[in-house]
Image (cartoon, grey):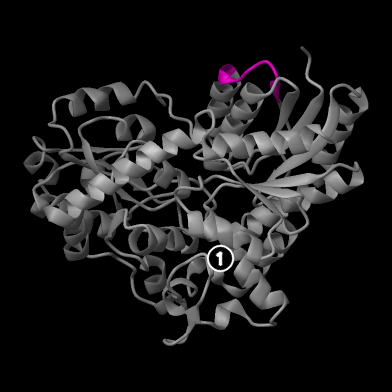
Amino acid sequence: MSAESELVFIPCPGLGHLVSMVEMAKLLVDLDDRLSITVLILKFPFDSEIDSRIESLIASVAARIRFVLVPRRSHSPRTSRRAFIHHFMENHKADVREAVAELSARGSPRLTGLVVDMFCTTMIDVAIEFGVPSYMFFTSGAAFLGVMLHLQSLRDEQHMDPTKLEGSDAKLDFPCFVNPLPAARFLPSDVFIEEDCRILLDIVLRYRETKGILVNTFAELEPRAVKALASLGAPAVYSVGPILNIKAESEKGFEILDWLDQQPDASVVFLCFGSKGSFDEHQAKETAHALERSGYRFLWSLRQPPAKDKLEAPRDYADPAEVLPEGFLDRTARVGKVIGWAPQVTVLAHPAIGGFVSHCGWNSILESIWFGVPIAVWPQHAEQQFNAFQLVVELGLAAEIKMDHRRDLVKGSDGVVTADEIEGGIRKLMEGEEAGERRKKVKEVSEKSREALMEGGSSYLSLARFIEDVCSR
């Protein structure tokens, strides 16, 4: 049977966003053979890994998913990351319009909608031009979506400036959280500078124009947050997660797996901070001291930050010993391993991993839940701080290392998390009755995450509702 309805997916070029959207496309075409999907690939100029990942994704998809590469455009390197993404998307709108026009001109299958990434809402204009509905894929969780809608409402309906809510008594009272959040702990970060806040909330305002929002979560993980979205004025919400790519990621993982195979079950602390995570020398030394003093086995993905004010990805250190305490690698050789880039999914799936020190990116959270690995939270910016708050306070699935790391940078300190804080967080993660209860709870949520995607599960049914909405046009 040939497909009848065509969806165009427009992901943000970041790997976490791109991979999640492609995985969702796989789920959709597997569920219903009436659908075909075209994924428009935009490339950041500074992302050297994207080409190899695209090749891998193309090789793994079904016949009813195809990729169209959008031409690269010039960019201004001297801007904030949020402003860069905004201007990047605006500069590619004409190319996206041309690609959609070619698809629409074919006539069969019939173009029935655009699904845009949470940062690609300017492409809603393209959907309007072609007379088709737009849907938005929110790659984070329902609680953070609620936070963004609430802050946008504060600005546009109550005429308040969210960047000014940093007094010691200010509270953010979201219906998606049981307890109000202390505003000073979350908002004064590098993400919420005035220009970036305006850009971000302008993007969020357009969420309300879409016909529906697909959220990478599952109802059993965030029941309160999912229910609260309607009261915040969201359009139809489809909880479709966890959307994950859980296959082995790289041959590089085999050496790591050989080492993990020699470790006892649930004995290794895995430290990994996402595709943008990196440590300078000062922070690397503090972390090394904490690991050595804790005595726990560890696998540490340590990467070098890009040059200051450069919109580039981190890279592996040529020689990690140069930024670590003298003799650290020799003293810990029997119990620890320092690596560069890590095949995170492959590592988290290994039975030797007993805890995960994470920056709390949403994909990392969902992966740790899927594999039943408890987390110690160490967020790096505002979105991750909200994720971490929910994990620690609302869901009780994590221990805390440092919740407001980036706020220290804004206040003018050097922003270094101390060895004492890191060691304390690792011990809370791995030791004692509380750690045992947390591990049990994570295992229970892990089972629910898998059941959500099974036939009859909450996310399975949500995906089916979305498909019916698309195909009934």
- The residues colored magenta run 59-66
Kind of residue at disc 1 = Val
Residue 88 sits above or below residue 18 on the image? below
Residue ranking furthest to the top? 1
Comparing 137 with 412, the one in front is 137
- The residue wearing badge 1 is 147
Residue 53 in sight in this render: yes
Can you give x and y, in whole percent of width and height, for residue 75 in the image?
Answer: 69, 50
As drawn, 177 above or below 321: below
Q: Nearer the viewer, residue 450 or 106?
A: 450
Q: Is residue 62 magenta?
A: yes
- Residue 429 lies, in percent from the top left, at 21, 53
Q: Can see residue 70?
A: no
416 vs 210, left or right, is left
- Which image quarter: residue 334? top left
> Which residue corresponds to the image point at 69% horizontal and 56% vertical from the top-left?
86
Quick check: 190 left or right of 346? Answer: right
Decide: few, some or many residues near mark 1? Use Cα within 10 Å; few <14, some 14-19, many ≥20. Answer: many
Q: Is residue 298 magenta?
A: no
Name which residue lies at 69% across and 38% down: 466
Q: Residue at x 11, y 38 (%)?
A: 335
Q: Quadrant of the N terminus?
A: top right
Question: What is the quadrant of residue 403 in the picture?
Answer: bottom left
* Residue drawn at x 11%, y 54% as measured from the top left: 432
Q: Secondary structure at mark 1?
A: helix
Q: How many marks?
A: 1
- Residue 423: quarter of image: bottom left
